[in-house]
Image (cartoon, coloured by chain):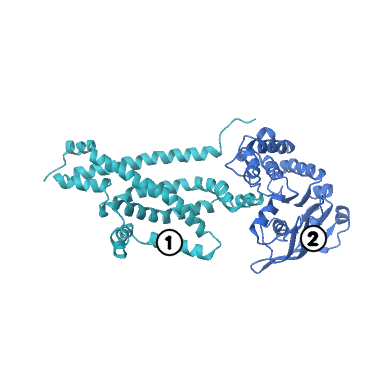
Amino acid sequence: MKGFDFANFLSYFGNGFLWEGVVITLWLTAIPMAGGLVLGTFLALMRMSKNRFLRDFASVYIWIFRGTPLLIQLVIVYAGLPQLGIRLGVVPAALLTLTLNETAYLSEIIRSGFMGVPPGQREAAISLGSPPWLVIWKIMLPQAFRLMIPPLGNSVNGLLKATSITSVISMEELMRRSQMLMQEKFDVLEVFMCAAVLYLMMTTAWGLIQRQLEIRFHTESVPVTEEG
Amino acid sequence: MIIQFEKVNKWYGKYHALRDIDLSVSRGERLVICGPSGSGKSTMIRCINGLEEHESGRIVVNNVELTKNRKRLHEIRQDVGMVFQQFNLFPHMTVLENCTFAPTWIKKMSQKDADQVAMHYLERVRIPEQARKYPSQLSGGQQQRVAIARSLCMSPKVMLFDEPTSALDPEMIKEVLETIVDLAKEGMTMLCVTHEMGFARQVADRVIFMDGGRIVEMNAPDEFFRNPTNERTQLFLKQILN
């Protein structure tokens, strides 16, 4: 029995190769999240549109991307599409798949945020003569965003961990780099425990950020000031 | 004639909400609309700025016929102010921002000019000191007065009030009604859905009673209250005045 080498485990926290993996994991989370928010907003608006074609398109998109495993989507994009002559590098394939997948989830969060804004808000805005884009941008989105922060936080947390799946297409993020290190000395437990702690640090840091966001966006619209 | 309804009909699915509405409102006129709930009074005034679409007949506002043309609708809405039962102030904006939102974004007014206009109207509704607060920090009556100021900032030609005091505590009804009375005295054209009959007596040129999607009675307030001809009007007045 090899046992658990605690000193060895600690030594991996000083490993620059793993920390680079942490950085890669972070942008592999941030970019699809940002892309998903933008595309998800459009998809949510399509889903709520009066136009039947747009509505159906959005529903089918969400149905497919939420209904199939991320792993299969990833393999299809990276290894399947070349069969049709579409060749994507590891990084573009990983970013694209994560973005497309996240878009489906985020659009539903965004849609529920929109639906949580009282209908009177929209009516008041259009009664003042606002065109639809202005109603969405200045009235609906800011209010919907507040409602969206808690579920959005869950999404970030989930995506951060889901990026590890891209290791199967040899995307060199934290998980993949842990596997590579593990194969050098077969410190399976030490390396993966270290990686697990690094993931935990990232999700914990996000938890703190989310808490701040919740406080800020809640108090911003209801500041406490003295009467007068 | 600033507003004209000709044989307007509206359905919600199978429910016939407005039946053959004919109505003309001239500039400067003040109409009070009352009737039991579900009689179509809110629906009627919401048709004037296209919040509800009518299925047949014609509605002409300020010489422009309401159609599905989006751009025209936005123009009409800039000329027609609306005040809602639930105030519908934007909670993420201060009182001042609520008032300058439409002038700056839609009329492309400079922030400075818009602030000035907003303060002018906030003074008229007698709450300039609340300009920096958020709606949630105000009482219902104050919120409704801000909503009135917000509409006035777009210099509307007509004001629509959809039960403006129904969501208010009794002690706040007076302050809101006084604001509307002031506005009426200045010659603003207005249509007001309300059950405040004292208010109707005080400001209305005509009082309209609706029932089952129809206008069943329309008269000057004196006549309306003294000699209601329609049976349902009589019953309604008896209930509401006791």
Q: What residue is shown with label 2?
A: B23
Q: Where's residue A214, x and y in %? A: 47, 41
Q: What residue is drawn where x is 62% and y is 35%?
A: B133
Q: How far apart are the alpha carbons under marks 1 and 2?
A: 48 Å
The disc label shown at residue A61, or none: 1
In the rendered view of the protein, which quadrant contains the C terminus of chain A? top right
Against A173, is B46 above or below? below
Residue B80 seen in this snapshot: no
Instruction: Read off the chain for label 2.
Output: B
The tint of chain B in the picture is blue
The chain coloured cyan carries which letter?
A
Residue type at tag 1: Tyr
Residue at x-position 69% and y-position 35%? B116
Q: Secondary structure at mark 1?
A: helix
Task: Give me the residue at 54% from left, 46% from top.
Answer: A143
- Camera-side residue of B13 and B66: B66
